[in-house]
Image (spheres, helix red, strand yellow):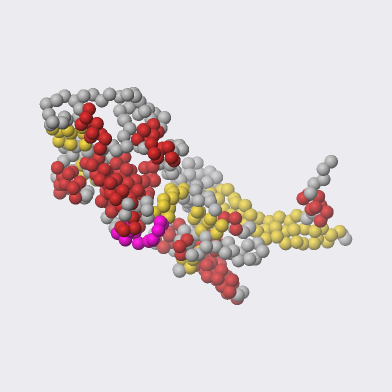
Amino acid sequence: MGFRWPLVIVGLSATFEALRSGLPFTKAQGVSLVQTYFDDPSICTNPSPNVDTSVTFNLVNHSANPFWFQETTTTAEALLRNSADDLYSNSFKRLFSSSFGDPNVPLIGVRPSSNGLVYTILDAYSRHHALVIRPDDIWLAIATQFSFFVNGRAEELRDLFVTHQGQEKMLVYFNPGQDLFSGAELAAAFGQELEKRLADPTLRHWIMPSFSTTTDTDRVVGSAVLMGTMKKYYTYFASMTCGIPRITLEGTQADWEDILRRVDKLLEYGLEAKEWHMRLAPVLRRFVATFDDPALDRPETRAFWENMVQYDGTYCGGEYISGWITAFCQFDKEGSWIHGRVDPSDNPTMIDGIAYPILDFSTIPPGYVSVNISLEIDETTYEAELVAGLVGKRVLSSHDTTLSTHGENDTLAPSASWWLFEKLSEEEQTNRLSPAFD
């Protein structure tokens, strides 16, 4: 007969019933609930940790052997290397974050294993150690196997999970101050986004562990397993989102109404000007409407300002820019129409059914004009150039410590500026472009 070992089962019988059914706990199961923050309080309700509800029993009258550590310490990176050697060897470059915190702090009491459930049980069985099993351990093992099952039949099961074909790009934005390199925050953000997009909105709650023993780490693992389950249907991208903490519209509402009336004159200048008007008018109408809803209580007002500008790239930069701000980038300095992407598959900003183009960052036109002027003074002619427009930005101070730490140099505004300068002669221009060498 094989060796039997002491066994500790952590959790109530209700835990196992929830595990069997895949449902989160309810108060009807006889435990007091508290909420633990992760990414959705509805799947983070746990019984009080002060109540010991575990079941412990002995299978044989045999003492347990101590675990023999061949190495006294390890690190988070070494644990990954020795547990998932294929991934580490093929793709690992550097560690951003892990459930073990500081990557430089040695880990004590954790050993590598490619399957933490199966090999732990086998090790306890063959080496005569006691064993502790949590509901989360069993459920995450099941969820991981389910992930493999789905990915092995992705096309066969597609209609059960998504409504699109191929792989759809999933992009989540992080606010300044959030850690883009935090696996925990990434898993939470993508888990929430998946719940919005999946054909079965209950799938996330079903996969996420929500037992009396569940920790924040378990919830990160659960969200990551959900992402892995859907990886044949989605590619995952995360970017820092830029944001404007506060916007002030100066002037009066009548001023903004005046601009709205003025742009109607564009309708007199042909098809391109009419199309430009078609994009400007919805924007200007909402400038006017904001004076009636300065607190942004109306969802449509808030959505408008949140869609002012979006970058397609990392850390508020990148190759493309979108949002209704592109209505002010319709022509280049030669007067040619700037063609942007407006195909629905590119997900352009839409207002009143009008698509606002996604533009290559390099096509943003200048915000100034220039005009040549000949100045005749005392029979002498000066060739001059007048440059004027929105050139530069003013740095202002709000003097509001609720907006920034010191309320200083925390606000920007466009700068309307002009210059009149004497131009270089043609010869001087040539010399500047091709300086002579001594």
Q: Is residue 227 visible to the viewer in this orientation of the structure?
A: yes
Q: Is residue 281 left or right of residue 39?
A: right
Q: In this view of the protein, which residue sits in the foreground, 144 or 433? A: 144
Q: In this view of the protein, which residue sits in the foreground, 181 or 423? A: 181
Relative to 90, say whether 352 is above or below: below
Q: Residue at x 11, y 26 (%)?
A: 61
Q: Is residue 86 left or right of residue 67?
A: right
Magenta part of the protein: which range? 158-168
The question of residue 162 being in magenta is answered with: yes
- Which percent across, then down, holds residue 408? 53, 43
- Which percent across, then down, holds residue 389? 65, 58
Q: Is residue 258 visible to the viewer in this orientation of the structure?
A: no
Q: Residue at x 58, y 74 (%)?
A: 271
Relative to 111, say whether 408 is above or below: below
Question: What is the count of numbered marks?
Answer: 0
Hey, which residue is sitting farthest right in the picture?
A: 379
Hey, which residue is sitting farthest front in the picture?
A: 1
Quadrant showing the C terminus: top right
The question of residue 308 being in magenta is answered with: no
Q: Which quarter of the figure has residue 88?
A: top left
- Which percent across, then down, holds residue 295? 42, 57
Quadrant showing the N terminus: top left
Q: Residue at x 36, y 28 (%)?
A: 74
- Which percent across, then down, holds residue 382? 82, 58
Q: In this view of the protein, which residue sits in the foreground, 122 or 281? A: 122
Q: Residue at x 60, y 75 (%)?
A: 270
